[in-house]
């Protein structure tokens, strides 16, 4: 064979995949590009196998989080696919979805919705009214419109996805659990807590049945349920759920993981609201130890927020020296992060610094 033979392109692409799997990325990219050139020389630019090679290169760049290069490769592949394949060919649907996903990750919601919407239309032509892939696209469109702030349209897509997943996959499938969680998250944000709780509980039942009790996704769902209990003022139930979340997270992720610190912080909030300052202090201090090792550099405001809570508890207990140490360190971190000292204000009767930090949201 000459180097511009079709079989050479196939072999080079296969070897490139091996290097990619071995994380030898420079060599993999070199071979992918050689494979593409050989394929174009042997088959011409407008050939389905050339489009396939471009999509593999797009996948490579996507895995490496080089979204601009991935976008260009997918676009080139789609241009060829539209010319040489049937309009509803599965490869076109996949490439449209790949392009949509890149725009979604870049927060370009309108373009992401357009591409996924076009993929959805072709899926209906190809598969009919109901199909697992259609449900997946409906689910993704729901997430996109949620990010755009269109809650009504988001819920419409997600509820359609949920119904289709129940019909196609059965009520106990993990994809059903995922959609239940997304819908529950929206209702949580709308403060429709009973609806959110019902959805999270069904998601938990599915995940425990499919994954067992000691799985990270089970911990996510328990965390969501704890948030709802906390929001409703059901502190004992919230403590129970956060404690079980913590057990699973430590088992699966290790004691020093960022998720563990987030759960400890929320547990501290609930103990504080429940009037147990000793347990609240223990939880906040545990969160702080992890935060110093995981987020102190990139997110110092989170550390300051936790120090602020520790200072509040010491103040409520009359422990002046540790109170001042915590507040002073919080103020120092807050200023060194470039935030205005004018944002340090008295908060309620505890004279706490009000450290601006996003509230934890339900996890998927």
Image (cartoon, rainbow, N blue to C red):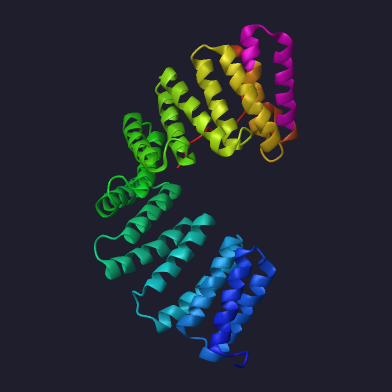
Q: Place residue 301 in its image quadrant.
A: top right
- The residue nearer to you, when weighing 318 against 29, is 29
Whether residue 310 is visible here, answered yes or no, is yes
Q: Position of residue 60 (x, y in %)?
A: 58, 67
Q: Place residue 313 in its image quadrant.
A: top right
Magenta region includes residue 24: no
- The residue nearer to you, when weighing 45 against 14, is 14
Main secondary structure along the magenta-highlighted residues: helix
Which residue appears farthest toward the top when viewing the image?
318
Q: Position of residue 232 (x, y in %)?
A: 39, 23
Q: Which residues are magenta?
A: 312-335
The count of marks equals 0
- The residue nearer to you, when weighing 93 against 118, is 93
Residue name at image x 49 percent, y 78 percent: 51
- Work out whether 296 lies above or below 274: below
User: In the image, 85: left or right of 293?
Assistant: left
User: In the image, 132: left or right of 292?
Assistant: left
Q: Position of residue 65 (x, y in %)?
A: 60, 60
Q: Position of residue 335 (x, y in %)?
A: 73, 31
Magenta region includes residue 321: yes
Whether residue 295 is visible here, answered yes or no, is no
Residue name at image x 73 percent, y 30 percent: 333
| Quadrant of the image containing the C terminus | top left
- Work out whether 246 lies above or below 169: above
| Quadrant of the image containing the N terminus | bottom right
Residue name at image x 38 percent, y 43 percent: 210
Residue name at image x 24 percent, y 52 percent: 167
- The residue nearer to you, when weighing 192 against 9, is 9
């Amino acid at each position: 064979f000459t180097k511009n033979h079709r079989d050479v392109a196939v072999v080079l692409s296969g070897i490139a995949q091996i290097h990619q799997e071995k994380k030898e990325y420079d060599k993999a990219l070199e071979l992918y590009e050689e494979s593409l050139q050989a394929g174009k020389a042997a088959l011409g630019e407008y050939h389905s196998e050339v489009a396939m090679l471009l999509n593999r290169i797009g996948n490579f760049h996507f895995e490496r989080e080089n979204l601009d290069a991935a976008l260009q490769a997918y676009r080139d592949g789609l241009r060829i696919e539209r010319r040489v394949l049937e309009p509803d060919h599965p490869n076109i649907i996949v490439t449209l979805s790949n392009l949509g996903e890149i725009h979604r990750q870049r927060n370009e919601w309108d373009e992401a919705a357009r591409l996924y919407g076009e993929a959805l239309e072709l899926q209906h032509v190809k598969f009919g009214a109901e199909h697992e892939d259609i449900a997946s696209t409906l689910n993704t469109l729901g997430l996109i419109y949620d990010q755009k702030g269109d809650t009504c349209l988001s819920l419409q897509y997600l509820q359609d996805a949920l119904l289709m997943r129940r019909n196609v996959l059965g009520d106990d499938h993990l994809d059903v659990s995922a959609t239940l969680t997304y819908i529950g998250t929206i209702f949580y944000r709308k403060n429709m807590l009973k609806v959110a709780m019902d959805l999270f509980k069904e998601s938990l039942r599915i995940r425990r049945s499919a994954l067992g009790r000691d799985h990270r996704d089970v911990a996510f769902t328990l965390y969501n349920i704890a948030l709802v209990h906390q929001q409703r003022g059901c502190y004992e139930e919230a403590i129970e759920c956060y404690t079980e979340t913590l057990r699973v997270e430590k088992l699966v992720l290790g004691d020093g993981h960022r998720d563990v610190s987030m759960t400890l912080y929320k547990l501290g909030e609930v103990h504080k609201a429940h009037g147990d300052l000793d347990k609240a202090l223990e939880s906040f201090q545990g969160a702080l130890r992890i935060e110093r090792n995981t987020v102190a550099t990139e997110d110092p405001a989170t550390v300051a927020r936790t120090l602020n809570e520790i200072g509040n508890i010491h103040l409520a207990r009359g422990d002046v020296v540790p109170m001042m140490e915590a507040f002073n360190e919080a103020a120092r971190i807050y200023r060194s992060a470039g935030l205005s000292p004018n944002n340090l204000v008295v908060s309620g009767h505890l004279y706490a610094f009000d450290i601006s930090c996003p509230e934890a949201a339900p996890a998927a």
